[in-house]
Amino acid sequence: MKKLLQAKALILALGLFQLPAIAQTQMQADRTNGQFATEEMQRAFQETNPPAGPVRAIAEYERSAAVLVRYPFGIPMELIKELAKNDKVITIVASESQKNTVITQYTQSGVNLSNCDFIIAKTDSYWTRDYTGWFAMYDTNKVGLVDFIYNRPRPNDDEFPKYEAQYLGIEMFGMKLKQTGGNYMTDGYGSAVQSHIAYTENSSLSQAQVNQKMKDYLGITHHDVVQDPNGEYINHVDCWGKYLAPNKILIRKVPDNHPQHQALEDMAAYFAAQTCAWGTKYEVYRALATDEQPYTNSLILNNRVFVPVNGPASVDNDALNVYKTAMPGYEIIGIKGASGTPWLGTDALHCRTHEVADKGYLYIKHYPILGEQAGPDYKIEADVVSCANATISPVQCYYRINGSGSFKAADMTMESTGHYTYSFTGLNKNDKVEYYISAADNSGRKETYPFIGEPDPFKFTCMNETNTCTVTGAAKALRAWFNAGRSELAVSVSLNIAGTYRIKLYNTAGEEVAAMTKELVAGTSVFSMDVYSQAPGTYVLVVEGNGIRETMKILK
């Protein structure tokens, strides 16, 4: 009882306990009760071998096949009705009897039952975000589920991922780390952000050991563990931050006199200074919470974003407009909480739902051309993978010049299995190019990259300057960056002679540790090089051929 009172006092002190409902009070207290999983749960956890490589954690803004919720609900029926309009809703129920009860409720509420399915399994709470598994691609074209020790003493919740994997018909991998899904976000390129409890709740392991497990099971090669700017309460990332795209991140904002103001401003500045997987600085967006509104605790489900709103209306609208600005083309939907289980600043819509990846995912990987680029030609590359083992066709680049007319489709060339290229030619100086990539397969799947496609395409400006650098490390002609996960080296090179070039990577001992041959255009080419197995350190990148040699030092 003492611990319970202390937990309530802490919530009050932080201004987070605003609700009179007794049931909500108890649920929130239950959520914070017990810092760690029990020792019995930890000992019983069965760790498996990691997935076969390469492994890649799937981001929330990638394709989802469904969304997972639990009965009794922590979300309003209006949200379920909205989710089921376009997407599949999987409801966790404890029994056939509960299933029938839910079907009756859904029918009475006008929920689209054709988009509803059920998993029968006992659970302890409605926080599906926290205890369900994390999705990853592995072994080139498979989608699997990574389980962990749930960091709360709720054994039924902790057991649920095995039922999820059985239902989906996918492999489950056991990663012996204490974790919670509210404290995890990934960019899909090998980077993950977590608060400090990722280390402190795994104190029997070194930070290096925690990082290694995240790499082995999820392909996380940049594990960004930060001090929680919201202070010591729930310590979940989704209470203050959210990846909106590989190059966009949303950070909570509070009034200047708020005790967490400086810590949140520092966090926003931290990400603004970081280079994202595309080689540019992050675009940082801010949603102002005047009274602990949980705006970052949203759900991205394919082309729709569900944002929890509490009022006042003017503050809610400002937050929704931030999403609309950051995510053009998406449908941004504000959702009020249910009366018995309203949204809290630290427990809202994202906490009580979880997207389900498509096990037949049609995946497009691409490093875009962005900003001002030297020409006259511009070459892009993309890898396309069918996890359904389906035949891929077509793969196209859609583009528009200077914002005029509709986007035109151009077939990309398959240079090797799953690897496609396209060159923009005949462009004039100062032409502004917008483009996105589209792929389809014979399973009926179709994807675009970026995910939203035409409403928010990649953009670059043609400079038509073929300026081959002659000074080692000069960045105008040769630019390279490790993606957010440090698993690939992305290279942008501008040359004045088209042809075959050799790209080599040397360590400080002068040993060649990686090499590849590429056909490059007279102008700008962007491609990637696998450096997953290379140790951290200083390297020299060399691009040579046709009488040209360009070099630069890079730090991994």
Image (cartoon, rainbow, N blue to C red):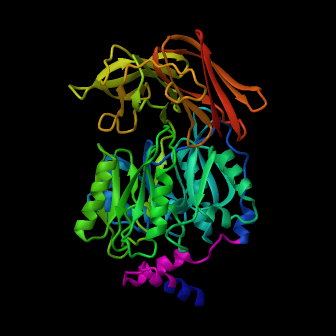
Most foreground residue, 87 or 250: 250
| x, y percent for residue 473 | 59, 29
Outermost residue, bottom direction? Answer: 2
The magenta span reads 10-38
User: Relative to residue 486, is residue 299 depicted above or below?
Assistant: below
Q: Is residue 97 visible?
A: no
- Is 33 magenta? The answer is yes
| x, y percent for residue 98 | 44, 65
Q: State the image quarter where residue 1 is shown.
A: bottom right
Most foreground residue, 540 or 221: 540
Which residue lies at the image location 71% right of the left edge and 35% below the top edge?
A: 534
Describe residue 187's horizontal placement relative to residue 101 as left or right: right
| x, y percent for residue 267 | 49, 60
Which residue lies at the image location 55% right of the left edge and 87% below the top edge?
A: 6
- Is 528 magenta? The answer is no
Q: State the image quarter where residue 289 is shown.
A: bottom left
| x, y percent for residue 230 | 49, 70
Which residue lies at the image location 59% right of the left edge and 10% below the top edge?
A: 547
Outermost residue, front direction? Answer: 471
